[in-house]
Image (cartoon, rainbow, N blue to C red):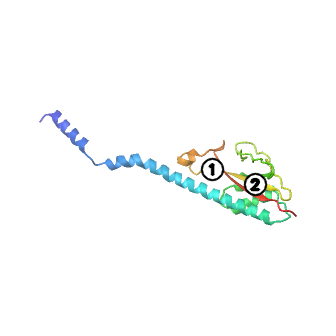
Amino acid sequence: MSHRSCIRQRARRWLRREDGTATVEFAILFPAFIMIFLSSVELGMITLRHAMLERGMDMAVRSIRLGTGTAPQHDEIKAEICEYAGVIPGCETTLRLEMVPVDLRDAVTVPTDVDCIDTSEEVEPVRTFVNGQENELMILRACVKFDPIFPTTGLGKQLKTDGAGQAALVVSSAFVQEPD
């Protein structure tokens, strides 16, 4: 047997071997599974924060509705929302409220552009916050910024972020300012 035929025979045996095929499958599928897992964790945290922000907003609006004759101010409502929300890190500094009166007789819509804090820019004063008149419909909108858990992977990479790398959660609620 010549040296060349021996090398060919060994090469054929080596190419026919099937041990290691699981390693190839693992190397191909593992990154996809990790991305799905990280995206699931990110989505779970976003859902939790959004649900708690909605709860905080609902509880604060309920308190406003039941507090007949009182007109809570911006900072009081903001503190109450953050207290009820609980799981939003830095809520007091990243929450922005907007209260807009709506005339039921005039088909005016609330602006769709939501005003949020961009921590990469200078802090802006409160956009619109007007305590309503008696029996006036008010729209209260809250926007809070958060840092994605995995900003470079999966869902965290797909989130729309500002200059500081933060994404926004927005909730709205409506109530009627009760008379004194």
Q: Disc 1 on helix, strand or loop?
A: loop
Which label belongs to residue 65?
Answer: none
- Residue under label 2: 140
Q: Is residue 146 visible?
A: yes
Q: Residue 49: image x %, image y %?
A: 63, 57
Counting from the top left corner in percent of width and height, residue 58 is at 71, 61
Instruction: Specify the amino acid type for callout 2.
Output: Leu
- Pointer 2 local density, CA inside 10 Å: few below 14, some 14–19, many at least 20: some
Q: Foreground: 140 or 85?
A: 140
> Tag 1: Cα neighbours inside 10 Å, few (<14), some, or many (≥20)?
some
Q: Residue at x 59, y 56 (%)?
A: 45
11 vs 1, left or right, is right
Compute the Cα span from label 1 to label 2.
Answer: 24 Å
Instruction: Point out the residue furthest to the front here.
Output: 105
Give the image quarter of residue 15: top left
Q: Nearer the viewer, mark 1 or mark 2?
A: 2
User: What is the quadrant of the C terminus in the image?
Assistant: bottom right
Which residue is label 1 attached to? 147
Q: Residue 91 or 137: which is nearer the viewer?
A: 137
> Residue drawn at (24%, 43%), measured in percent from left and top?
16
Residue type of the residue flagged with mark 1? Asp
Does any portion of residue 151 appear in the rendered image? no
Task: Name the spot of residue 59 as percent of width and height, x first.
Answer: 72, 63
Give the residue furthest to the left: 1
Position of the N terminus, as image quadrant, is: top left
Sequence-first tag of 1 and 2: 2
Circle 2 — which element?
strand
x and y percent of residue 44 in the render?
57, 56
For image coordinates 84% across by 60% down, the residue present is: 71
Q: Is residue 119 left or right of residue 14?
A: right
